[in-house]
Amino acid sequence: MSKAIAYAAYSAKEPLKHFNFERRTVGVKDIQIEILFCGVCHSDLHTVRNEWHNAIYPVVPGHEIVGRVLSVGSDVKGFKVGDLAGVGCMVDSCRVCADCADDLEQYCDHNIFTYNSPDKHTDKMTYGGYSNQIVVDEHFVLHISDKLDLAAVAPLLCAGITTYSPLRHWKVGPGMKVGIVGLGGLGHMAVKLAHAMGAHVVLFTTSPNKAEDAKRLGADEVVISKNPDEMNLHAKSFDFILNTVAAAHNLDPFTALLKRDGTMCLNGVPENPHPSPNIGNLIFKRRQLAGSLIGGIKETQEMLDFCADHNITSDVEIIPMRDINSAYERMLKGDVKYRFVIDMSTLKPE
Ligand code: NAP
Ligand code: ZN
Ligand code: ZN
């Protein structure tokens, strides 16, 4: 075991504060990583505040982790001490089910998330990336290019793969009209990725002041989704819409914009359910409403390599660990361009 320090939530109502704990002894297939940067995902906030009713405290959030390898087990093949390494939303899965066999570990019924999952190595929960170090099985560790800015790479480990995976699954590419709903952490990555894949990208936002940024990030058009006239101009015209909104909202104005056989995929997991969609909107045009969860490890590596090739990273605001509580408040107000990333060198022993 090795000593670790972190910031943790001790309950849904308290600010995060220092937490001391131990990481497991590095096993033969394990990699111990010194965490350099960790992105701040809206899922961290949902979990910390128990909006999904599954938090087991203390919760050490953080699943957008980049760092450097500190030590490796004797059977580790792909990493050596000093290498850059990344960890996303998962740290283990059953490895034998049909989902695992298809490199879709995110859909494994027995996968272990990076935080707030029962940890088979200890009698505790898994503790995530708001921490100085982590020990993870090699299978769940990603290679990080040294060509890109490390802090700006961190959000790729969740926001990047969560949007890349559905864009690939629904074969987004040239000749397609693709909508992205919400310009937050996920949404701004979706705009960049869909643009790089060659689609015509339309960003839907509730925040008119984000329009200019959206175009800079790669949107061809911006629609203020609260304006029905603007929305109507795009009726029945989209091949695919990726909805990244973190709050419950009416889905019908968006499904009405899909062509026949078009799909809207939901990424957001709001605290409260969306109002039930208008089924007529779906059946009269054979439209589909779908969902998608992060992405598998193989696809995460593919996404990281795609981003290195296309020079894509996240737009980040780097914060010290002690600012995490105010960062959550700012994220709720949409006051971040477009992802907070914690500089983990600012995490000191208490
Ligand atoms: P975020 O940075 O807070 O962005 C969410 C965006 O949603 C906001 O920027 C805003 O965009 C829009 N929005 C927020 N409240 C809204 C409201 N009341 N009405 C309309 N639009 C609103 O969050 P994120 O980190 O991107 O995460 C987004 C969601 O995806 C969260 O629910 C998160 O838990 C979930 N998530 C899912 C997965 C998965 O695997 N499926 C993975 C990661 C995260 P505009 O200002 O442009 O309207
Ligand atoms: Zn996330
Ligand atoms: Zn499995």
Image: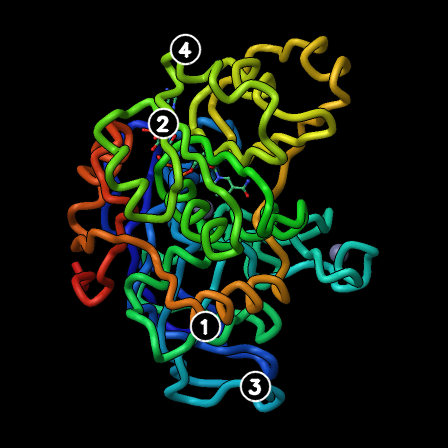
Residue lying at 55% horizontally and 18% vertically, measured from the top left: 235
Residue 312 found in image quarter: bottom left
Q: Secondary structure at mark 4?
A: helix
Q: Nearer the viewer, mark 1 or mark 3?
A: 1
Amino acid type, residue under disc 3 in the picture: Gly
The reply to whether callout 4 and callout 1 are in contact (CB within 8 Å) is no
Q: Is residue 328 above or below residue 101?
A: above
Residue lying at 40% horizontally and 32% vertically, measured from the top left: 182
Q: Secondary structure at mark 3?
A: loop
* Within-10-Å neighbours for mark 1: few <14, some 14–19, many 20+: few
Relative image position of residue 204 (x, y in whole percent): 41, 28
Note whether ligand 3 is within 8 Å of mark 3: no
Q: CA distance from mark 4 to mark 1?
A: 39 Å
Q: Which residue is mark 4?
A: 229
* Within-10-Å neighbours for mark 4: few <14, some 14–19, many 20+: few
Relative image position of residue 92 (x, y in whole percent): 62, 61
Q: Which residue is mark 1?
A: 309
Residue lying at 26% horizontally and 31% vertically, measured from the top left: 334
Q: CA distance from mark 3 to mark 4?
A: 54 Å
Q: Nearer the viewer, mark 4 or mark 1?
A: 4
Q: Is residue 284 above or below residue 22?
A: above
Disc number placed over residue 78 in the picture, else none: 3
